[in-house]
Amino acid sequence: MDAPAPANLTSTFLRLRPDSSIEQMPFDDTFWPRLMSGKLGDFHHEYLVTTSSFHEDWSSWERHPNGDEIVCLLSGAVTFVFDRGAHEEISLSRIGDFVFVPRGIWHTARTRVPTVMLFITAGEGTQGRPAVPTAAR
């Protein structure tokens, strides 16, 4: 019997369930629309583990009103911006640097280099709003 092949977080995301079980969730172009429409469940008391690659500022802000989030730098460099009434910035530049995003805090990311991040998100009720383009700041 062949040994199982390793999974990869660029093509398979993970749902961490309250009973400590893990569900592998294949990632494709339909993943985010299915997630946002509720077709993948509501993530009540569950966490979503994902990776994301990007090379420019996020086009939106987000917040997670029902739980905290951990965001870890895997490569590149990024500045996380928090809106707590006033903007607060935290720069991540070393592999393994991470930020703790408390429940309910609006946040976005800014970068100018190819960046890969790991997200561990309490996704239930996630909200978004457009970000102001860099040139308008």
Image (cartoon, rainbow, N blue to C red):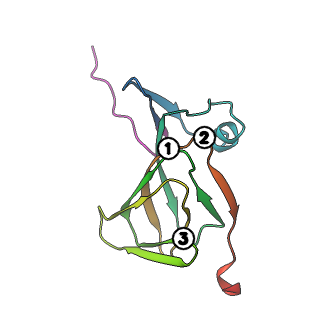
Q: Can residue 112 be seen in the rendering of this structure?
A: no
Q: Nearer the viewer, mark 2 or mark 3?
A: 3
The percent coordinates of residue 9 (x first, y second) are: 43, 43
Give the SS element for disc 2.
loop
**CA separation, marks 1 and 3?**
19 Å
Q: Position of residue 74 (x, y in %)?
A: 36, 60
Q: Is residue 98 above or below residue 2?
A: below
- The residue at 55%/39% (across/down) is 27
> What label does residue 122 carry, if any?
1
Q: What is the x, y in percent for residue 100?
A: 39, 59
Residue 80 falls left or right of residue 137: left
Look at the image and say whether residue 12 sits in the magenta stretch.
yes
Q: Which residue is mark 3?
A: 84
Residue positioned 47% across, 74% down in the render: 113
Q: Which circle's residue, 2 or 3, is located before the other in the chain? A: 2
Looking at the picture, does residue 58 appear above or below residue 134?
A: above
Query: Which portion, as a residue range, is magenta?
Result: 1-13
Count residues near mark 2 (Cα–Cα under 10 Å), then give few for <14, some for 14-19, many for 20+: few
Image point (41%, 72%), residue name: 77
Q: Amino acid at mark 1?
A: Ala
Viewer-side residue, 43 vs 27: 43
